[in-house]
């Protein structure tokens, strides 16, 4: 289980959006990062800098936690989730020097992960815990359109009674054509596919269990996040280590990077696993290069016992992905200054700028979080820059609080 500040409910402990990159030269060049304690900051990828915290105190209660960010096509509208308040905030970012809150939508459950369809019509929101519900938000009216609640899925029809399971939705991603929605179910170790129609209605399609070995059903990876490739045919799940539920005393952890193939709207199958031999424990976010030929995965390492005086930092692992969706290790790992040892369900805590060269990385959790972003040059690849945040004042007595960035997205 994740370790997270006790100011947040347990459901947030383990917490996707449309691709935050883009190539249209007439679209805005900026990013938005959520600040957990309150507000947002604008990221300028041209100068590689961050603006002062904005909208502090305007995005719900201080203890609610601002987690995920999604930016609508064109960049005029940005969404930010407030987990504890069950709210999704609409922010007008037409003028990035003066972002303005225009509305908030109560989705009826803890709001964590947000995804926006490429046509900008709908936003989908999931919880970070035991919730079988997806909220569908109408972007034009800035209202809750409907909610989809999962039903029992038949796992084995040879038993009496038949074996079923009801998914929880912990992270969400939408295919480029807007027809397929993939949701991560951490607790069952599965990815669930839904279809989305033109009216914003979700319908169950299929699911896959993330079993590295079909002959050992108790051993599985648990997805924290999932990202669909630019071609809409493959997805990569960010997972926690390989666990053995049948023999918890002998559970061991080996990190793998599973792929899921989308064969038609709502129909998926399990692809290959790239199981790493590196000493890694879990992953938080996967980002595809604009061409879709590379995948960068944000991972936390296994800490040796006894723990060393200087703990190893989190790392970015580079993978190659073939046209058929087969992952291979590119042999490149970049260590970061972050030392988070848990994750946030579905929150995209790193994003590529529109050049596809620079990767901006945030905190994968609030436990041991830092008041900064880190920037990697993927052409090298290596860490090149830290973007620090000053403390923010959120209390009436003027007490400064550390500014902890979480979700980040660049305007598509």
Image: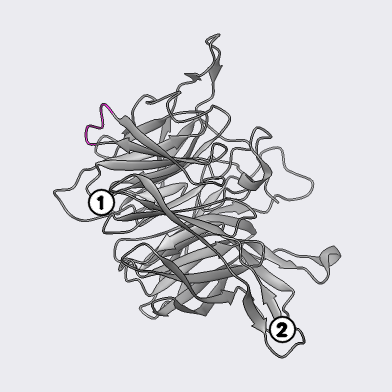
Seen from the viewer's position, the closer of residues 361 and 61 is 61
182 in the magenta segment: no
Q: Position of residue 59 (x, y in %)?
A: 44, 30
Residue 124 versus residue 10 in the image, above or below: below
Magenta stretch: give its range: 94-98
Left or right: residue 33 versus residue 8 is left
Q: Is residue 330 visible?
A: no
Left or right: residue 15 versus residue 380 is right
- The alpha-carbon separation of the residues under discs 2 and 1 comes to 44 Å
Residue 26 versus residue 90 in the image, above or below: below
Badges 2 and 1: C-beta atoms under 8 Å apart? no
- In this rendering, the count of numbered labels is 2
**Residue 122 found in image quarter:** bottom left
Residue at screen point 71% across, 37% down: 309
Seen from the viewer's position, the closer of residues 218 and 303 is 218
Which class describes the residues within 10 Å of circle 1: few (<14), some (14-19), or many (20+)? many
Query: Main SS of the magenta segment?
Result: loop
Q: Position of residue 253 (x, y in %)?
A: 71, 63
| Element carrying mark 1 | loop
- The color scheme shown is one colour
**Residue 219 found in image quarter:** bottom right
Seen from the viewer's position, the closer of residues 285 and 309 is 285
Q: Position of residue 181 (x, y in %)?
A: 43, 66
Judging by the rendered image, the residue that carries numbered circle 2 is: 162
Which residue extends farthest top? 397
Seen from the viewer's position, the closer of residues 90 and 250 is 90
Residue at screen point 59% across, 67% down: 276
Residue at screen point 54% across, 33% down: 370
Left or right: residue 382 versus residue 22 is right
Chain-order first, disc 2 or disc 1: 1
Which residue extends farthest left? 26
Judging by the rendered image, the residue that carries numbered circle 1 is: 73
């Amino acid at each position: 289980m994740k370790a997270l500040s006790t100011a947040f409910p347990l459901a947030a402990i383990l917490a996707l959006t449309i691709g935050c990159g883009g190539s249209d030269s007439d679209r805005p060049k900026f990013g938005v990062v959520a600040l957990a304690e309150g507000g947002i900051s604008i990221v300028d990828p041209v100068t590689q800098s961050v603006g002062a915290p904005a909208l502090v105190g305007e995005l719900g209660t201080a203890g609610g936690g601002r987690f995920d960010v999604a930016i609508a096509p064109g960049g005029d509208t940005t969404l930010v989730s407030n987990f504890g308040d069950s709210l999704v905030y609409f922010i007008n970012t037409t003028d990035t020097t003066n972002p303005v809150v225009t509305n908030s939508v109560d989705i009826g459950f803890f709001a964590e992960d947000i995804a926006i369809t490429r046509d900008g019509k709908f936003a989908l929101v999931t919880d970070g815990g035991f919730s079988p519900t997806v909220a569908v938000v109408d972007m034009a009216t800035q209202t809750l359109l409907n909610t989809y609640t999962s039903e029992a899925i038949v796992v084995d029809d040879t038993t009496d009674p038949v074996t079923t399971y009801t998914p929880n939705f912990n992270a969400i991603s939408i295919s480029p054509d807007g027809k397929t929605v993939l949701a991560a179910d951490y607790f069952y170790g599965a990815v669930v596919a839904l279809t989305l129609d033109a009216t914003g209605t979700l319908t169950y399609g299929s699911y896959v269990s993330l079993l590295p070995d079909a002959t050992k059903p108790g051993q599985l990876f648990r997805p924290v996040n999932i990202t669909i490739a630019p071609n809409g045919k493959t997805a990569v799940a960010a997972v926690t280590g390989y666990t053995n539920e049948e023999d918890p005393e002998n559970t061991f952890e080996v990190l793998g990077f599973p792929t899921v193939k989308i064969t038609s709207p709502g129909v998926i199958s399990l692809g290959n696993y790239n199981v790493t031999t590196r000493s890694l424990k879990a992953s938080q976010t996967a980002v595809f290069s604009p061409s879709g030929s590379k995948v960068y995965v944000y991972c936390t390492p296994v800490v040796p016992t006894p723990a060393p005086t200087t703990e190893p930092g989190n790392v970015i692992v580079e993978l190659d992905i073939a046209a058929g969706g087969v992952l291979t290790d590119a042999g490149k790992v970049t260590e970061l200054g972050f030392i988070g040892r848990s994750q946030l369900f579905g929150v995209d805590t790193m994003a590529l700028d529109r050049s596809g060269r620079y990767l901006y990385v945030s905190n994968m959790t609030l436990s041991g979080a830092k008041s900064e972003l880190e920037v990697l040059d993927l052409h090298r690849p290596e860490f090149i820059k830290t973007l620090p945040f000053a403390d923010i004042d959120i209390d009436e007595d003027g007490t400064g609080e550390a500014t902890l960035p979480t979700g980040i997205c660049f305007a598509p």
